[in-house]
Structures are given as structure tokens and as C-alpha cells.
Image: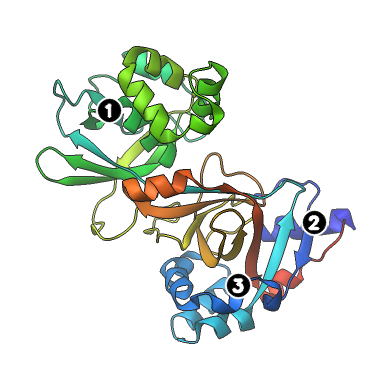
Amino acid sequence: MKRYLASLFIFIFPSFSVGDVRITHFDFSDLLGWSSDNHDLALDVFKETCPDLKAPDWSSLCAIAQNTDASREFFEIFFKPVHISTGDAALFTGYFEPEINGSRIKTDRFSYPVYSMPPELRQGQTWLTREEIETSSTLRERGLEIAWVDDLADLFFLQIQGSGRIKLDDGGVLRIGYAGSNSRPFKSVAEEFIRLGILEKHQASAKMIKSWVRKNPQAGSKILWHNESYVFFRVVEKLASDKGPVGAMNRSLTALRSLAVDPDYVPLGAPVWINKKGTPPMRRLMIAQDTGSVIKGSQRADIFLGSGDIAGDKASQIKDGGSLFVLLPFKRAMLLSSHE
């Protein structure tokens, strides 16, 4: 039976690696807070990306979605909530679109480069570490600089978020999105600050780390090298200023309705019900529109909070447990059954 279940799971999630998976079906009445959510907002976000879902069942539901205003009924009639677990505890975090200062040219103030993907680097290829990139001449004077920014710590956290807005010194705004990485392991600099005794656990926030690095730029840059992962960017054209950043589905993200997930377990474009614990709790219908290098596991998700410092402060406070339920087309969901 395990082998049969694994075969069905691989059919529905082609990139999944075989392992122990528990599938549990739920009714919408089981989802705490379901009846009080704003299903209209979730349906609007679903409509944005569902045209990219090419499987026949998804395509049919997308066509129906474009022509309905009965949002709650749409989800309840055509979908089935499914809880997918590999035994790991659920973890919800938050992310946002940073806004940092920059220039199109290098100056004394704007001296830290934001690089585009070097042509010799292929996706998935392990490449130079963060330290090697920043201290060698490998990328310099090759025209790979998208812009120059004035704060190393801001650039570091921009890479962690994977997209952002650069407010240019000429008054313009440059939107940039994730283009690729050096495929080196992501390591927490917060944990490194704690290990070194520089910050206590309760102090190790992005804001405190930025402040320390700004006051101690040489020592700070070396601690940031602890995270070997390095992200490259691309310029995002024709994106209105009131739209969110572009996610993995190449569509704008919507604050508090777009979710980054592990596509090995959650199909991109699928509706997802989250029951996040913590203060405050969050129970709402979101759409899986993004991914992240550290978002791994069936019960792992990153909630998009919006753009700017306020959204960043809110995002940094989210690190909570709970439960995540994928809404799958009814027949697709019924292919999966609950077995140990």
C-alpha cells in the first residue's frame, strides 16, 4: 500500500521524492475560521495565476473561476482540503519586498554592486561562495552590475528576500527579482551572531544585525560570509508601482494572500488554507505563488507581507507553528488516501 500511495503522489506531484507521507482529507467545516474569511480576495488572486496551470482539471476550474462571483461556493464545490505530512512540525515565517537606496552608477556612497546572473553559471550549479564573490575580481568590470547600493547589510537581506525595489538617486525606482543563485547552502547569520556572543537570542533580528554591521562594517562583512548562499537578480520590467513583486509564477504577489511553498508537496497556483498559531493567529485562504531556497517540507510556508519597512518589521516577527491544508481539485484529491 505504501508503494501504491507513493506512486499516486508522484503522479500528482512529479518532482516528489519517495518517502513516508501521510495524507489526510478534511471537510471545509473542519477548517477553523473558514466561514469568516474573505473568499473574494483569495479568488481574485487565484484568477491571476490559474491560467498557468495546464493540467485539464486545473484548466477547467480556472475557466469556471473567471466567470463566477460566488467565491466561497466555488472553492467548496470544486476542491477538497488535504493535509500532507512527512512528520515534520509546521513552520510559518514571513517575507516582504525590501526598499533600499541605490544608483545606476558607482559612487563613493553607492559602492556595493547588485549583480545579474553571470552567463557561465547554470541553475543548480554550485559556484563561488559569498566570500569569494565579494573578495575576488570574478564579476567585476563585466557589465553585470544592475545597480549600486549604499548599505551592505541591506543588500544582504535583499538577497534573502529574493526581490525588492531600489530607490535611485535620480528619483526613479528599479524593481528587481530573483534570477538565480550560487547554489551554496543557506546558513543563518542570526545563529552565527548568537554563537559568537555578539547578540543574545532575543536580540538576533534583522534590524539588530543590520545595525551591528553598519557600526562594524569590516567585522560585519566577515560574519555575513558565514552564509555562503549568494543571490543574483534581474530587472523586472513593466510592473506597476502599486503591484507586488514577481514570484516564482512570474506574476505579482499580493500581501497576505500570496504564499511561498515547497512545490514538491504543494502545486504552484493551488489554493492553500493556513491555520497559523502565534500572536496574532492567522487563518485565511492563500494562493501558492512563490518558492524559496529555505522553504522545504510539506508543512513549511512563507507568508508575503507586502513592501517596505513596516511589512519587514511584521515579517520578522512571524515564526509560528500551525497547519497547512492544500485545496486540490476534488477528483485529484480523492486519488490520495490516508495511510501510514
Which quadrant of the structure image shows residue 131? Answer: top left
Tell me residue 50's x, y (percent).
48, 69
Q: Residues within 10 Å of mark 1 (few under 14, many from 20)?
A: some
Q: 308 left or right of 226?
A: left
Give amino acid for label 3: Gly
Checking the image for residue 303, the label placed there is none
- Give the Cα separation between the discs numbered 3 and 2: 24 Å
* Residue 119 appears in the figure: no
- Please, what secondary structure does the residue beneath circle 2 have? strand
Marker disc for residue 151? 1
Above or below, 167 against 127 in this view is below
Q: In the rendered structure, are the residues bearing label 3 and label 2 in contact, judged by CB atoms less than 8 Å apart?
A: no
Q: Quadrant of the N terminus?
A: bottom right
Query: What x and y, as percent, mark residue 136?
Result: 35, 12
- Confirm or deny contact between disc 2 and disc 1 (CB under 8 A): no
> Which class describes the residues within 10 Å of circle 3: few (<14), some (14-19), or many (20+)?
some
Circles 3 and 1, Cβ within 8 Å, touching? The answer is no
- Secondary structure beneath dot 1 equals loop
Mark nearer the viewer, 3 or 1? 3
Residue bearing the label numbered 2 = 22
- The answer to which of 174 and 311 lies nearer the viewer is 311
Structural distance between the alpha carbons of marks 3 and 1: 42 Å
For the residue labelled by badge 3, is the local secondary structure a helix, a strand or a loop? Answer: loop
Where does the image place residue 4, in percent across and percent down from the top left?
A: 85, 58
- For marks 3 and 1, the one nearer the N-term is 3
Q: Identify the residue at horizontal 38%, vertical 18% (top origin).
A: 221
Q: Tell me the mark number nearer the camera, choosing from 3 and 2.
A: 3
